[in-house]
Image: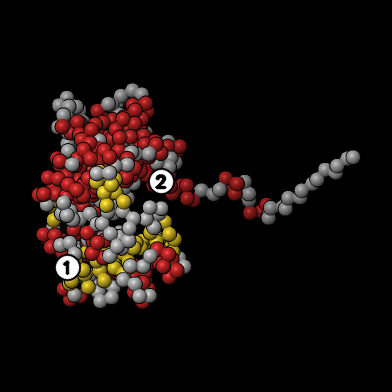
Amino acid sequence: MIVLKRSEHPISRRHIESGALRVLSRLYRAGHTAYLVGGSVRDLFLDRTPKDFDVVTSARPTQVRKLFRNCRLIGRRFRLAHVHFSGSEIVEVATFRCQPEATDGDPFLITDNKFGFPEEDAYRRDFTINGLFYNIADFSVIDYVGGVRDIEKRMIRTINDPWTRFQEDPVRMIRAIKFASKLDFKIETKTWKALCESAKAINKSPVPRVQEEIARLLEEGASTSAITLMYESGLLKEVEPNLHNYLKNPDPDSVWDADGQLLFDLLSMADQFAKDGRKLTRPILFSLWLMPFVLQKGLLDGSAPDKMVRKEADRVLSTVGVSRRDMERVGQILLAVRRFRAVSQKGKRTAPKAFLSKSYLDEALLLYEIFVEAIEEDREQIDWWFEQRNEFNKVKKVSPHPREETRTPSSGPRKKRVRRFRKRTS
């Protein structure tokens, strides 16, 4: 175990959200051990802004609830405490757990619901960089697993044997790639070898969990390198064989993607948009995933595009667990791209108002902008559509409500309605 004193690490309480500090302090004052843990400690070490702050403690869930009126207990297999604060800040509080135990000889079938001690809790985590504790008692960083060393080396390494860890929870393979691409770290040689050899194990994971990790991987702003690592490791072949085969065997006769690089061009531009603070929703990201397929099938110039887009979405996106609702949105966005090009190329002075009022218009415009920038086309068309959208929104804001249009200032206040009841006859 390594303990870094306050003067030996860069983490400051000024960079920790007030809610997390309040939880840590109150647990400590109540006599419990309380640590900040996981990705928040890692990100603070790297001078990054954490997305959330998780706390681990010696207090049991019921004890946490007694300390916080704004606490809710969740989970069945293992109880967690969610402490709610204003501004939709939620601090997740977990009790120290011991290392999981395999059952029936299959490391995937594990029980992970026993309370333990800090060192045991550290060793049950996935990667060394996520196994650091920030101690509110003396503001030190506690390292049981070599996380500080790997942060300094910019290395992704599993805690203990990587083959075992990936068999216990195959989704960790996607997480390893996500962290490597997001943080611009390298995956340690032994961990990478185990990832490549264990790729088939991902099929044992629940599809919703895989879909959630894929979505997060695309949202991190480093999706280009992430998809590259998934392809090189063989994990993409198991998760989505259609995309793997598409990238492996590009169509040299394709008008849009003869060398199979269109997806990477789209993702690279999307990553840049995300870094610039542009909001990329999951339907937009999954539309980028699907776009090379539908362009090849004639999205922009073929017949019956509606049926084709929905068929391709069902074939490609259902394998990674994308919901029907999101697939429907993806179809709307992609068909809107076809309409963008068709309307603007006809040289119309204005766009149809019914189309400009669609709920998916902003997402479709953002996707179209990514597409235009990725293929290095002139921005004249996309700029024209943004002007049409902005003008429509201005008119929409200043237009009076339809009911108000019929009333004039001279008409005076509306008369109170008098209800009349018919007398019953015997």
Front residue of 384/205: it is 205
The image position of residue 105, as x and y in percent, is: 24, 44
The image position of residue 412, as x and y in percent, is: 68, 55
Which of labels 1 and 2 is toward the front? Answer: 1
Cα–Cα gap, marks 1 and 2: 62 Å
Q: Is residue 288 visible?
A: no
Check the image and report above or below for 162 versus 376.
Answer: below
Front residue of 333/69: it is 69
Q: Is 137 on the left or on the right of 391, as rendered?
A: left
Q: Is 340 on the left or on the right of 161, as rendered?
A: right
Q: Earlier in the sequence, mark 1 or mark 2?
A: 1
Q: Which residue is mark 2?
A: 391
Q: Secondary structure at mark 1?
A: loop
**Amino acid carrying mark 2 in the image:** Glu
Q: Secondary structure at mark 2?
A: helix
Q: Which residue is mark 1?
A: 1
Front residue of 118/284: it is 118
Check the image and report above or below for 338 versus 149.
Answer: above
For label 2, the crowd category at 10 Å Cα-Cα, with few meaning under 14, some 14 to 19 and many 20 or more, is few
The image position of residue 424, as x and y in percent, is: 85, 42
The image position of residue 47, as x and y in percent, is: 21, 64
**Amino acid carrying mark 1 in the image:** Met
Check the image and report above or below for 204 versus 94.
Answer: above
Quadrant of res 266: top left
